[in-house]
Amino acid sequence: MKATCPEIILRQEVLKDGFHRDLLIKVKFGESTEDLQSCRLLIKQSIPTGLFVDPYELASMQEKNMTEAVVVSDNFNIEAPSYLSKESEVLISVRRDARCTGCFHAFLPVHYRYHRPHSEDAETLIVVSSPDLLMSCDQEFRVLECWAQAEVAAPCALKSQDICQWSSLQYRLIHKNVILRVPVGLTVHTSLVCSVTLLVTILCSTLILVAVCKYGNVSL
């Protein structure tokens, strides 16, 4: 980035614990953002095979004005395990952060997929790559010319089928990649898990059958 250009800083954070996380992306512009009033910002985020985004959850959150995001990948299956999945792509609308001048943020709920059991290591790693930061403005100004590094085709709006040209912005990333550690099963436990699961299933089925016969007035 040229020395005369103000800096854009982007930070990715993962919130919550467990198999259901929130990806928070923060953007800070290094100068006054008054010129950006006529501009729109989008995050184009690649979702690795070990994660998925639920489009129905996104639709529900959009109705509650919690976030604006849409899955743009075709043949997207939220129930497939990681080894049968493909990378997907999500567009997220970037909102202003009222608590910080020149700050914006984007929010996306993500979920772990099921992974193959490992022979030795009880966890696997998921790497969330850095996103593309896209901007579209109604007018040209010097700062945009300073930041823009390429033209990218993307929907004019999240709910629109029309395609517009967006400027892909250069930024400085805080932490290169987000790495998530996912616990997985061990193959040496396969026999034990199957045996216990079968015994529990038989026991529960027997108890249900006894209860139905005793209290359900059902004759066999």
Image (spheres, rainbow, N blue to C red):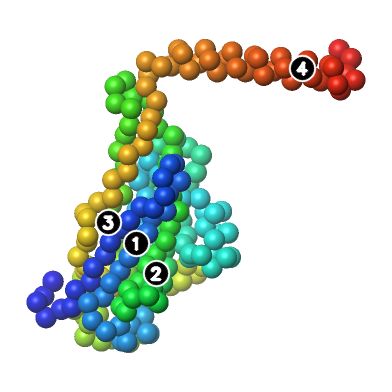
Q: Which residue in the protein does label 1 denote?
A: 25
Say what amino acid the circle numbered 3 marks.
Ser
Quarter of the C terminus within the rendering: top right
Kindly state the secondary structure of the residue where label 1 is placed.
strand
Tag 3 near tag 1, CB within 8 Å = no
Kindly state the secondary structure of the residue where label 2 is placed.
loop
Kindly state the secondary structure of the residue where label 4 is placed.
helix
Q: Which residue in the protein does label 3 denote?
A: 130
What is the CA distance from the residue labelled 3 to the residue labelled 2?
15 Å
Vertical arrangement, residue 81 with respect to residue 217, above or below: below
Image location (x, y in percent) of residue 147: 21, 75
Kindly state the secondary structure of the residue where label 3 is placed.
loop
Quarter of the N terminus within the rendering: bottom left
Q: Which residue in the protein does label 2 denote?
A: 94
Say what amino acid the circle numbered 4 marks.
Leu
Q: Nearer the viewer, mark 2 or mark 1?
A: 1
Q: Is residue 212 left or right of residue 1?
A: right
Of the image marks 2 and 1, the number of the one nearer the N terminus: 1
Question: Dot 1 surroundings within 10 Å: few (below 14), some, or many (20 or more)?
Answer: many
Of the image marks 3 and 2, the number of the one nearer the N terminus: 2
Of the image marks 4 and 2, the number of the one nearer the N terminus: 2
> Which circle marks residue 209 in the picture?
4
Of the image marks 1 and 4, the number of the one nearer the N terminus: 1
Q: Nearer the viewer, mark 4 or mark 2?
A: 4
Tag 3 near tag 2, CB within 8 Å = no
Tag 2 near tag 1, CB within 8 Å = yes
Say what amino acid the circle numbered 2 marks.
Val
What is the CA distance from the residue labelled 2 to the residue labelled 1?
9 Å
Q: Nearer the viewer, residue 168 or 25?
A: 25
